Image (cartoon, grey):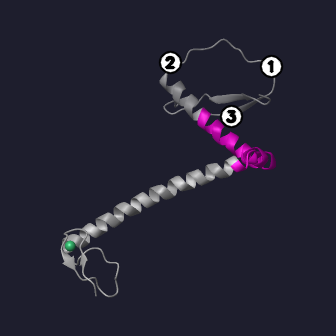
């Protein structure tokens, strides 16, 4: 068996027959160094892997322009779900703002028409005799 130089302590050692590519001698310090290096490389690999994934996705989208447009037109339920999520996010922000700031009463600017009325919970507002609703035009 050939003698190698340990990558950590620099002393010569003889790799074990099962591990001909061994780079570190068997001293505990050098073995923990080996694990440290291995973990660091793993982390870097993971990062490269993630970046590659993102790149690959972007490249795929570049090669398939219009994919999302087509997908959305073929999956109206997906679009509706996304709209609903966005509405939920919007109304959350709105009610947070409402709770934070002094509410100034705007002059009535609603046009006659069809609207959705949706009950909204405002944190910190505990009036039981009123409903707080969000009004959304049926046809925006
Ligand atoms: Zn060593």
- Few, some or many C-alpha atoms within 10 Å of disc 2 (few <14, some 14-19, many ≥20)? few
> Image quarter for residue 110?
top right
Instruction: Please name whichever residue, 81 or 75, is drawn nearer the observer in this view of the structure.
Output: 75
Q: Which residue is mark 3?
A: 118
Residue 14 visible? The answer is: yes
Q: Is the residue marked 3 within 8 Å of ligand 1, measured from its CB?
A: no
In this rendering, is residue 35 above or below 87? below
Q: Which quarter of the rendering shows the N terminus?
A: bottom left
Q: Residue at x 73, y 49 (%)?
A: 64
Q: Which residue is mark 1?
A: 112
Stretch of the chain drawn in magenta: 63-90
Q: Is residue 29 left or right of residue 83?
A: left
- Residue 46: x and y in percent read 45, 59
Instruction: Please name whichever residue, 103 or 47, is drawn nearer the observer in this view of the structure.
Output: 47
Residue 121 visible? The answer is: no
Q: Residue at x 71, y 50 (%)?
A: 63
Query: Which of pointers 2 and 1 lies earlier in the amino acid sequence?
Result: 2
Q: Which residue is mark 2?
A: 102
In this rendering, is residue 45 above or below 104? below
- Residue 13: x and y in percent read 22, 80
Q: Residue at x 40, y 63 (%)?
A: 42
Q: Quick check: which quadrant has ligand 1?
A: bottom left
């Amino acid at each position: 068996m050939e003698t190698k130089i340990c990558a950590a302590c620099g002393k010569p050692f003889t790799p074990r027959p099962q591990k001909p590519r061994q780079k570190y001698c068997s001293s505990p310090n050098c073995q923990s160094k080996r694990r440290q290096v291995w973990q660091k490389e793993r982390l870097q690999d993971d990062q490269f892997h993630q970046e590659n994934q993102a790149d690959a996705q972007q490249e795929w989208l570049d090669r398939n322009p219009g994919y999302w447009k087509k997908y959305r037109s073929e999956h109206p339920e997906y679009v509706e779900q996304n709209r609903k999520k966005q509405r939920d996010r919007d109304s959350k922000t709105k009610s947070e703002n409402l709770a934070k700031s002094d509410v100034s009463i705007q002059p009535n600017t609603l046009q006659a028409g069809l609207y959705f009325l949706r009950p909204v919970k405002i944190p910190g507002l505990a009036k039981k005799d009123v409903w707080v609703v969000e009004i959304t035009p049926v046809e925006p």
